[in-house]
Amino acid sequence: MVREFDLIGRYFSREVPEGYIGAGDDCAVLPEQPGRQWVVSTDALIEGRHFLSDVDPFALGHKSLAVNLSDLAAMGATPAGCVLALALPKIDENWLSKFSDGFYFMADQHSCPLVGGDTTGTGHGIMICVTVFGHITPGTALLRSGAQYGDDIWITGSLGAAHIALKLLQGALPANDVLLADTRAALERPRPPVMYAAQLAGLAHAALDISDGFLQDLGHILKASKCGAHIIFDNLPVDPAIRNLPNELMQEAVLSGGDVYQLCFTAPQRHRNAIETLARQFSTMVSRVGVITEGNELVVETLSGRRLMPSQLGYQHF
């Protein structure tokens, strides 16, 4: 029988960088960051609500950290470390080995060492809770409340593929193995633009990560900044895998589909060249999709002037 501390030692106690104290004591210790502010975020993933029971455990480990790194990216923060709380209905060592490999893959890639956490049993499904720590230069956090009239609205990456993959896996769309193969990675292995986002201080005014749907999340910026937006649908970065879907379905996926974990940010027009230069430097796709307007109206229209508005703006947690 594998006991709790054997489980932690075997799967979640890899070496941490110099200056850190990781798993093994009551608390982790992170090195001081002189002249910097700490940024902290936490997310919970629940089996049956945030992920399907048969998801590949490596992909689940990857996504568990990726969704939190996406929050750091939204603030323009540099990752510093993370802790993991894991509740399991049973101990499956094959599952744990693959899950931890996926988690550490993201941790190593983004210099975000796992420094502690907790494990426990549960009578229900798997629950994963990750807390991430990052740091920023004081006064440079990319807040939702910073958008200004005339700002360009930008998106990193592409939209829609994760939504379609989820619909296929849930049986809400007719089975299509080719389409699922082309969209599944977007759902299960998101890649937030962490390194790129950390360079946006001084360029962007406001930002957030797209997790619940582009329009719904953009709405959080508009509400916090007390402004409106004009979006040109034709400029949105539609994922290539879904471009040939029926228009109504494609538009729903792009405008309302969640699980994107890319950045939406606003910036003054004078910074367009700098934003695109940084994007090339960090191999990040960026698209300029609209502009911040006065008032509080969110308008989405095509280049021909046809207005679009889906029946649901995005994912609802309750």
Image (spheres, helix red, strand yellow):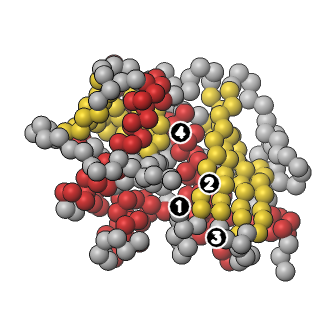
User: Going from the N terminus, do you reach mark 4 or mark 3 first?
Assistant: 4
Looking at the rendered structure, the secondary structure element under dot 1 is loop
Report which residue position mark 4 lands on: 73
Report which residue position mark 2 lands on: 44
Query: Identity of the amino acid at label 2?
Result: Ala
- Compared to residue 187, the image places residue 25 above or below, namely above
Find residue 50 and name its label.
Answer: 1
Residue at the image point whose x is 74% and y is 24% from the top: 34
* Residue 135 pos. (x, y %): 65, 32
User: Distance of mark 4 from mark 1, alpha carbons?
Assistant: 21 Å
User: Distance of mark 3 from mark 1, alpha carbons?
Assistant: 11 Å
Report which residue position mark 3 lands on: 125
Looking at the rendered structure, the secondary structure element under dot 2 is strand
Give the number of the mark in front: 4 or 1.
1
**Would residue 244 be visible to someone looking at this image?**
no
106 horizontally vs 177: left or right: right
283 horizontally vs 298: left or right: right
Query: Identity of the amino acid at label 3?
Result: Gly
Q: Crowding at label 1, few (<14), some or many (≥20) Cα neighbours within 10 Å? A: few
